[in-house]
Image (cartoon, rainbow, N blue to C red):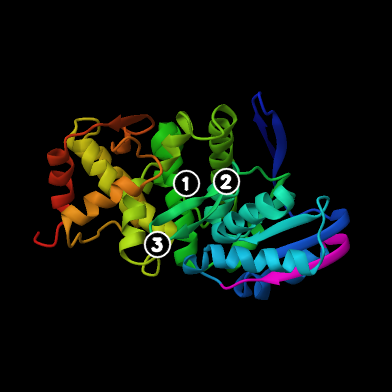
Amino acid sequence: MIVPIELLPPKPVRYDITIDALPKLSFDTKVVVVTNPTVAGFHLDTLLQNLEAKELHVVTVPDGEQYKTLQTVEQILDECFEHKLDRKSLLIAFGGGVIGDMTGFTASLYQRGIDFIQIPTTLLSQVDASVGGKTGVNNKYGKNLIGAFYQPKAVYIDPAFLETLPKREFAAGVAEIVKMAVMFDRAYFDFLKTADLRDEVQLKEAIRRSVELKAWVVNQDEKEAGIRAVLNYGHTFGHVVENETDYTTYLHGEAVAIGMVMANALAVELGLMEPEEAQEVKAVLEKYALPTDYVIENIDDFYEHFFLDKKSANNSIKFILPKGIGDHKIVKDLDETAVKRVLAQFGAKR
């Protein structure tokens, strides 16, 4: 199954997202695989059996969101220089969203840009992070604030890699699947309400539909000037949760799940969503044991963190909210009091 990415002029780009067993890959150039110890332990042998290159090297970086930093990117760059990669060389991101983001960002930097491909091994990266060319790292000010839009040459999604995924990591990917359905497709959400994504056939269908939706969005809006911003549903709140907890308490998808519940509460407050619809979304998230609750210790601090979000501009916060289920609305210039009233629902004294 192939889903194409076809970016529009002035900079047309086309590449394929393949959803199937990993094919044999052969490259007449130097190749560096970037991975982490967890993925390497489970799957590196499988990748190397399917990979041929003029010269092949593997770079292993620490596992975890807290290592998604400029320091780790510099470590990968050092390896590229040590192995004398040139502009025809290739990087392969073999791991989850953290590995994909850092590898793509490194590829954009090395000698002003070399090719890379994505081979995602987590559900979150398969349905979301590996598609669309967003790359970057975190810093003390927030998540993904340093980075580039840099498209891969190909994406290979093999659901078999998910067989070794811990339950929490699998659930984190489900959060991104739910995000797509709530924003764009009521029928898809209804499928998710009854589906068991632990079933191989239903999981592959969910991956296909999520990738098709993501590709449809990216093809229209590569650099988030319009509709692509809708994919940040749950992220404006979720990124603050991650930042407050130093990226160590929650997986990214778990924080997004909390963020969606908060965004839904704001949508209910504004009359964009019925309380029953918010409960439907919460129930699907909880079906996979995703966290849906969070205690905001300081509402003023939480609110101020919104202004570090990439979607905020001119001292105005942009909120991506559901309009019922299957539609969306981008809201900005909201009254601070209204937003804090919603945040108070998650305050310490409830």
Query: From the viewer's perspective, is 12 left or right of 282?
Result: right
Alpha-carbon span between mark 2 and mark 1? 24 Å
Residue, disc 2: 148
Q: Quadrant of the C terminus?
A: bottom left
Residue extending farthest to the top is 9
Residue, disc 3: 140
Three-letter amino acid code of the residue under disc 2? Ala
Q: Quadrant of the N terminus?
A: top right
Secondary structure at numbered mark 1: helix
In the figure, 146 relative to 53: above or below?
Answer: above
| Image x and y of residue 140, in percent | 40, 62
Three-letter amino acid code of the residue under disc 3? Lys
Is residue 203 or residue 303 the one in the foreground? 303
Most frequent secondary structure within the magenta stretch? strand
| Image x and y of residue 122, in percent | 57, 59
Is 307 inside the magenta-drawn segment?
no
Is residue 61 or residue 95 the one in the foreground? 61
Residue, disc 1: 177
| Image x and y of residue 306, in percent | 29, 47
The tag on residue 92 is none
Residue placed at 22% from the left, 49% from the top? 303
Secondary structure at numbered mark 3: loop
Q: Which residues are magenta?
A: 50-62
